[in-house]
Image (cartoon, rainbow, N blue to C red):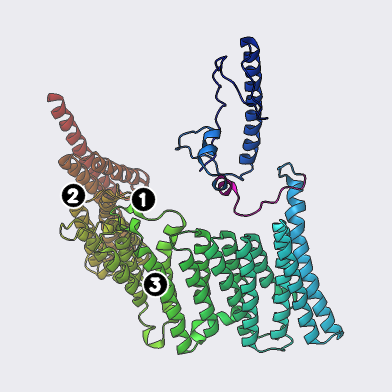
Amino acid sequence: MPLVLAAPAKVPSLPANVTLMPPGGVWFGPVSSGAHMTDEREAIERLERRLEHLEAIVRKVLSRGDLPLEDPGSPAEPLASSWRREPRTAARAEVTPAAPVEPDADGSGTRDLEQWVGQRGLLVVGVVALVAAGGFFLKYAFDRGWISPWFRVVGAAVAGIGLGVWGDRLIAQGLRRYGAGIIAAGAGLVYLGIWAAGGPYALVGRQLGLALLTGVTVAVAVLAVRHRVEELAILATVGAYVAPIVLPDRGAQPALLLGYLEVVGLGSGVLAHQMSWRRCFNVALLGYFGRGMFLAWGMLGEPVGLWFVAAGGIAALVATAGPRWLEARAFGLAAAWLSLLLHNAPVQSTGTRSLALAVAVALAGVVWWQHRAVTALHSPAIDALPEGVESVIFLASPLAFALVSPIHFPGALRSWPALAPAIAAVAYAATGWPRRSVPHVALAFALLALAAAVQWHGLVIVLAWTGLVLGAVAVAVDRRLGQPGGLVVAPWLAALAFVQLFWFSSGYRTQQGAFVDDWALVLYSYVSATAFSARLWRRPVPALGGTEHAHTALWVLTGAAILGGGSMELQRFFAARAPTWEAAGLAGDLALSAYWLLYAAALVRTGFWLEQKAVRSAGLGVAGLAILKIALYDLSNLEALYRVGSFFVLALITLAVAYAYNRRAQALSRR
């Protein structure tokens, strides 16, 4: 039970006829009242001083973290009563720490820079220097031919085992951190000797070398678990990764090196996961992919390297499920996808490509399955998307699968790059559709849009994205389907289709066929689909975070497409029918000014009809652009007759709009 401190209770005054038995056990008879009160007061003062001293000692112990602090929700109990009701052994077991704690060098409990450098910094430097000295000695002895390879390997192993035994005894004596450093140094020497025997010296076969490395890893893991020292596991893992650097061998087989890294990395990762050692897991994962990419990058595109990438990526995802340790989760997945993306698939065989594709499916499948089981993702609100790193993983993993998988497709599937994003879209739709999960359904529509982008080009992409916009809004407003996730992506797809239509596809048109060519027909389809989608959005739909202005965005895109598309078609129409280029420019400029003014008037009229101030303001904005064009461009470039027509249209439209505003003001004043 938690130890509670309380103020010492005042002992009540005793009657004069009551006898007291002091600690010595001698009975005293009745005493006079004055003398009795004096002795009682002195006894109480001594008791209070002892309790105050005891409180000071306990507070000091609690400040060092050796005892559990009191639960704020538990009622306070006097110190003496809590000890009285509990057995003595139980109280002692309650306050005993799980492992011995090393006091500081000066015994004061303070930790400053000097103490940290002397106790930890120098220990790390000493361990690294010891392992480096052993490696350099083996290399120097090998170059000079002093001793046989067997003697060098056995000597390193014996020295490492001796250091491990000594470190274990030091930990038993209370020097946990120092003893852990000595054990780590010994493990590094043993790793070094086995690596030399299986690598450059070729004294043992690959399988035996891997078995010996596994045995050393298990031994260090047992010591780390036995003493519950995370630093020991970290230093042992670092020593294992440093061993190939200390004793390099250019002729060593990359496959053997990858096997060595796999044993060390996975073994350390499993240990860190079981003991909930976050730092150790990060070190193991960083060394796994970092050393693998640096020492055997060319092998990562081969079957043995693909197995290496798959093992590391999947192990990182499984160990960090929950999610926890998000930095390790993101790094492991990113390193695996990067290894698949940067290797040259065209030079690989069909079997190797198939294996790489299987690795991509496995990585994306694990992420999909983990997010499928997360309850928070199934909330009917976009705010249910995981925050921070996990949201990036949720969105980036299927995207990486859609982009990486076609690179490794066999020859029969190379002409269908849309297959990978389409499969991912079906998987996420199958997960989110029954639950009406907003993030899953939204991601499914986004993956379908990506599939259209990688499979087709030009106007076909515009049609596909426009159809997805209409479908996304339709499934959201339908009472039977009720999939609001489509509302999240609909405005973005409409904006992308707009950019594709006016920025990329318009440059490939010919000078013929204004208002009736393929581009114009796609423009009509886009305007119709976005307007109808915005109209459907008026029905009651769930309120989603981030979509407050999406309905307005669809109307804005519709209006912009009408204005921009009509302007382009008018210019093309007069350019195709005028006898000269100059005449085409004059007629086109006049038509463009008139079109802008008529469009502005239509917006103002629509705003009055719908009682929408934003629509009327947009009409006034378009009218302002038309006025600027007429005043700055038409006045200086158009001939007299065209100039007269331009200003005449301006006068008619502006007077009509002003008349409408004045009538409205008059009607409002009468109310």
Pick the residue in front: 422 or 327: 327
Residue that badge 2 annotates: 540
Extent of the magenta region: 91-106
Picture residue at 20% right of the left edge, 34% below the top: 661
Q: Residue at x 49, y 33 (%)?
A: 76
Residue 26 lies, in percent from the top left, at 66, 27
Say which residue label 3 marks.
365
Asked if the magenta segment contains residue 78, the reply would be no
Q: Is residue 236 above or below residue 254?
A: above
Residue 7 versus residue 129: which sits nearer the camera?
Answer: 7
Q: CA distance from mark 1 to mark 3?
A: 63 Å
Instruction: For the residues labelled 3 and 2, say whether their Cβ atoms are less than 8 Å apart.
Output: no
The x and y percentages for residue 2 are 52, 41
Residue at mark 1 to residue at mark 2: CA–CA distance: 51 Å
Q: Which residue is mark 1?
A: 637
Asked whether residue 588 appears in the rendered view, the answer is no
The secondary structure making up most of the magenta span is loop
Mark-to-mark CA distance, 3 and 2: 35 Å
